[in-house]
Image (tube, helix red, strand yellow):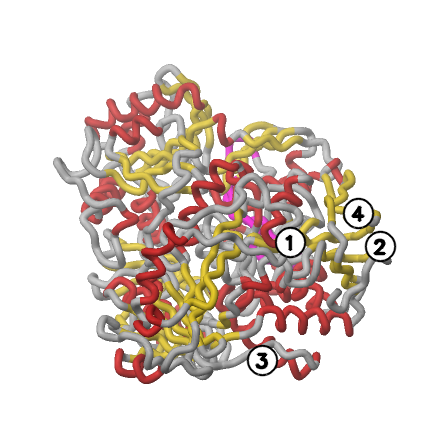
Amino acid sequence: MVGGMVGGLPGRARVVVVGGGVIGCSIAYHLALLGCDDVLLVERDRLTSGTTWHAAGLMVRFGSTSQTSTELRSYTHDLYRRLEAETGQSTGFRPVGFVELATDPDRLEEYRRVAAFNRYCGVDVHEIGPREVAELFPPARTDDVLAGFHVVDDGRVNPVDVTMALARGARTRGVRIVEGVAVERVLTRRGPGGLPEACGVRTAQGDVEADVVVLAAGMWTRELAARSAVAAPLQAAEHYYLITEPFGGITPDLPVLEDPARYGYYREEGGGLMVGLFEREAAPWHVDGVPADFSFGTIPPDWDRTAPYLEAALSRVPGAADAGVRTFFCGPESFTPDLRPIVGEAPEVRGLFLAAGLNSIGILTGGGLGRVVAHWILEGVPDVDVTGMDPARLHPFQTTPAYRGARTAESLGRVYAAHHPTSVARTARGARRSPLHDRLAAAGARFTEVSGWESPSWFGSGPSGGPSGAEPEGPEETGWGRAGWFSCWEAEHRAVREGVGLFDLSFMATFRVAGRDASAVLDRVSAGAVAGPPGRITYTQWLNPAGGIEADVTVTRLDEDDFLVVASDTAHRHVHAWLRRHLGDAHAVVTDVTSGWALLSLQGPRSRDLLQALTSADVSGAALGFRDVREIDLGLARVLCARITYAGELGYELHVPAEHAVDVHDRLVAAGAAVGLRPAGLRALSSLRLEKGYRDHGHDIDNTDSIWEAGLGFAVDLSPGRDFVGRDAVLAARGAPPVRRLAQVLLLDPEPLLWHAEVVFRAGVPVGTVRAGSYGWTLGGAVGLAMIEPGVHGVAEPVTQEWLDAEPLEVDVAGRRHPARASLRPLYDPTSARVRS
């Protein structure tokens, strides 16, 4: 037994953490560090016995364009440096340095973009040439290296030692750690409104009551969560590394080296070289369920399957191929469908937190994740953007064996794949299809995946799509520059600006909220007043008590006690859970009607002409004004017609019963020929909405942004006597101009492209980053929404239009700065005259 108690479980703890790997121990440590010592950590075997014990121990900060992920890495790096002095337990931290290799133009472009963003976040990364790479890592070949990206004080740690240091730090602050006791299930009870809430755990040695339960059980988390009807789609896969016998040139002070193009990472181990693999096609392990008694175990290596990848990796360091093999190790690590962790409160069960699915970055983010989860539990809201890790972004269908088996085979390899901005997963596709899928495919749709839905990214050749005879490559193969399909994208964009375009948005989350208290409940959760007259749409945000934006939705009052709520696909389960939890014991019902409807969006200056030709209803501007909703006839169907736009034009969203979708679509297409109707995809929708400055929660705005910072003050109703969640925080922040602000950014040079995470400079000083980018075909250059926050690298001062205009602005695109302009008002149609026409 390693330093824990056997038996003697307490009858109650405020927080029970399940799992004694690096994540569980970090959460327990940080709970105690933040003042909560009434914590029990339960480990079924011994600390580190799942995946932690065989992790490679890389401690690198370079590589992510997520601010949250980069901050987690930096916090973890600093924690591991100081933890030994605090606890007396070594972490094995060795800042030998880290070098990432770029051996082709696409990776060079990617890493230059990553490097600029990481420097903005405080990571001291430098681009170096092949000669400098050779000097830092002499055993490696560098004849094909275009550049390396060097972080001097990154390096490696000992995963077991780190975990033991965290455990020791937790114990000294009062946390109880019990090893050798398996948790069988999470206990739940009926909470407010009849919704389940966690109330403890059941173990082989008895039950323990708790206010909060955290499942940090690594690859066992999915099965434990499923026993409480909670979806946690993660799956273990075989993960390999080889350790050679000692050979010449391998010294303890060599930096960690990564060469993703050759599937490998390299570090010194016992005088030899550890060569880790992320093969392109991986092998899922025990899709049927991880054995309960698997502990400190290994998997027999599959030499035949991995030989080509191992050969490629060893070719980077020729001496390794000639050295003897000391160990060829294979052990399980768990991966998620989108290579993002599953961290946060489960939408299905209040008080049940998940912290798993780390996709091989558990050690290098473990410290930061522990701090975030502990803060979230104790304060009630997270203090970082968690939209990319929220368990609610994933769906129950992704837990099926067929889905997990197919997607995981690809997921591991995507860790080291080139991360092109339009790349999408290839496996487990076709899970969710709109009623119009076949029609769209026939029209030349090139599909991308949207929360499991197949949705057109753009339209190529076909009966009504793309230039005649054009067969441009798929968007997942584009790299970073312009591709053949850009002409299709541009044509769709211009069709919406100049004529009319038709989008299938059936993936949008749609809910019916009905009952005598529906109005009161929705008015309570919405920053905007939604209890207006029937037939009106309210665009509004839902806030947490700290004023952060939890959701960005439209709420339509259909009747006195009947409302329609529409949210983005990524917010689907989060919005559903948020609604249900705020219902409490109110007399109202929330029904998810997403699958019962198709949502067709008809957008452009000629959309009214087309719609009027197909209905007997009056859809003139006088009869159906902006944000009005009416039920109308359209062909053989009755549809709900909402005059609303996400493209910045006159437009309509048609909520069509699924069984009528094909008929309505076909009539629109047939009649649309007379007015130049064009099918349009998500690429065009993105460029259109970014030209207009429309926000997208989870991309441009998140739970850390206030209404004022996001430029959404117009959507708030602060009328006297009106109360809503987050009102006090909104009022407290009202007044002085915000010192961080979301602004549109337009590049003045029409050639470079914006995608995401490019750094914005003002007078040579970094002042923000692009959260989402596209190409503004109407504006004549790349356009994006950037969070401008001068206080990050200077003195915080109000961000006003005058301040933005006072000094020259530039945006770093892959290491080159390009002149830009920024605006707090929409650059396209700033008065919304076209929208209201």
Q: Amino acid at mark 4?
A: Ala
- Is 311 located above or below residue 528 in the figure? below
Query: Callout 3: few (<14), some (14-19), or many (20+) C-alpha neighbours within 10 Å?
Result: some
Q: CA distance from mark 2 to mark 4?
A: 15 Å
Residue 433 position in % (x across, y down)? 40, 31
| Residue 773 seen | no
Picture coordinates of residue 529, whole percent (x, y):
59, 44
User: Which quadrant holds the C terminus?
Assistant: top left
- Mark 2 or mark 4: name the one nearer the start of the chain: 2
Mark 2 residue type: Arg
Say whether disc 3 or disc 1 marks the residue closer to the N-terminus. 3
What secondary structure is found at the residue carrying circle 4? loop
Q: Which residues are magenta?
A: 533-554
Left or right: residue 4 versus residue 281 is right
Residue at label 3? 81
Classified by dominant secondary structure, the portion drawn in magenta counts as strand
Amino acid residing under circle 1? Ala
On the picture, is 390 further left or further right than 442?
Answer: right
Disc 1 or 2, which lies upstream in sequence?
2
Any mark on residue 217, and which?
1
Query: Distance between the Cα atoms at labels 3 and 4?
Result: 38 Å
Nearest to viewer (mark 1 / mark 2)? 1
Q: Is residue 754 magenta?
A: no
Q: Which residue is mark 2?
A: 12
Label 4 CA crowd tier, 10 Å (few <14, some 14–19, many 20+): few
Hey, what amino acid is under mark 3?
Arg
The quarter in which the N terminus is drawn is bottom right
